[in-house]
Amino acid sequence: MKHTALITGASNGIGLELAKIHAKQGGDLVLVARSADKLAQLAEELRSQYGVSVTVIAQDLAASQAAHAVFAETERLGIQVDILMNNAGFGGHGRFFERELAKEQQMIQLNITALTELTHLYLQGMVARRSGKILNVSSTASFMPGPLQAVYYASKAYVTSFSQAVAEEVREFGVTVTALCPGAVATGFVAAGDLQDVDAWKNAKSAQSVAEYGYRAMEKGELVAFNEGKLKLALEWVIPLLPRKTVLKMSRMAMEKSK
């Protein structure tokens, strides 16, 4: 039986690459993103190249109740989701008090609320079947506070913590939850988050390489997956030993724009 994977934010970046990887392995897909046109084009390419079934659901997960609408549609179509990849998310650069509150609220809705809702909705079926995998795309940003990206960093801290806790809860049922924590990735995230000229993105990894690493980690049921060994060492063994004010200064410097 082909495993069906539902991928959010599937129209570009890491989500698009995850869709290609899964289709290449012969897996069916449910693709979710805002752009119906982009999804339709990608779906046709994957059907033609790999002979898999691809369902498209155009939804803006930053809108209230969108996650429930996605779940309702897969239920209506009789699609069993065996793998859930929560990839959709966005950031935003600037001092919190100067940014639009509405933008920050949308970020929380997408990065935290929609991810939580989708996980809850699809996890119940996985637990009942005693089989399933979830990949939540988090970030190395989840391991420290982020001046100039305060809400984004905080939202990813939630994703990493939430993923690990749920992973422990469902381990006995044969279900795994993996938090993928990449560093800077060269995607549309940079332009959308006004992160051009930020030093941290000068050596960004490709979306393809990050997706491949994350997909393998999910297959193996890893708990937290870092695609960069040096970042893993720094975040797990060096930064926790530093004074908090030092960490904050380092974090802010990484997010400063080049003059």
Image: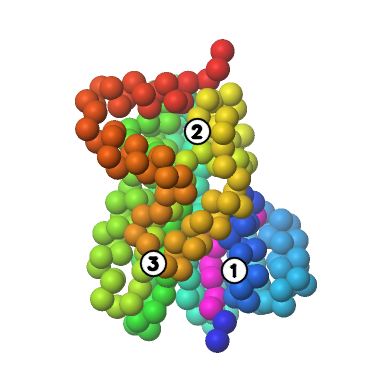
- Between circles 3 and 2, the one closer to the viewer is 3
| Residue at left offset 28%, top offset 34% | 238
Which amino acid type is marked by label 2? Gly
Q: Quadrant of the N terminus?
A: bottom right
Disc 3: which residue: 221
| Residue at left offset 29%, top offset 63% | 166
Between the C-alphas of marks 3 and 2, the distance is 31 Å
Disc 1: which residue: 22
Which amino acid type is marked by label 3? Gly
Between the C-alphas of marks 2 and 1, the distance is 30 Å
Q: Residue 256: image x %, image y %?
A: 47, 21
Taking the image as drawn, is residue 218 in sight?
yes
Q: Are marks 3 and 1 in contact (CB under 8 Å)?
A: no
Q: Quadrant of the C terminus?
A: top right
Q: Earlier in the sequence, mark 3 or mark 1?
A: 1
Query: Where is 165 relative to 192, above or below?
Result: below
Question: Most extreme residue toward the top, as rendered?
Answer: 259
Residue 70 shown in magenta = no
**Magenta segment range?**
3-11
| Residue at left offset 42%, top offset 49% | 226
Taking the image as drawn, is residue 189 in sight?
no
- Between circles 2 and 1, the one closer to the viewer is 1
Disc 2: which residue: 92
Q: Residues within 10 Å of mark 2 (few under 14, many from 20)?
A: many
Q: Nearer the viewer, residue 256 or 117?
A: 256
Question: Most extreme residue toward the bottom, as rendered?
Answer: 1
**On the picture, is 103 further left or further right than 46?**
left
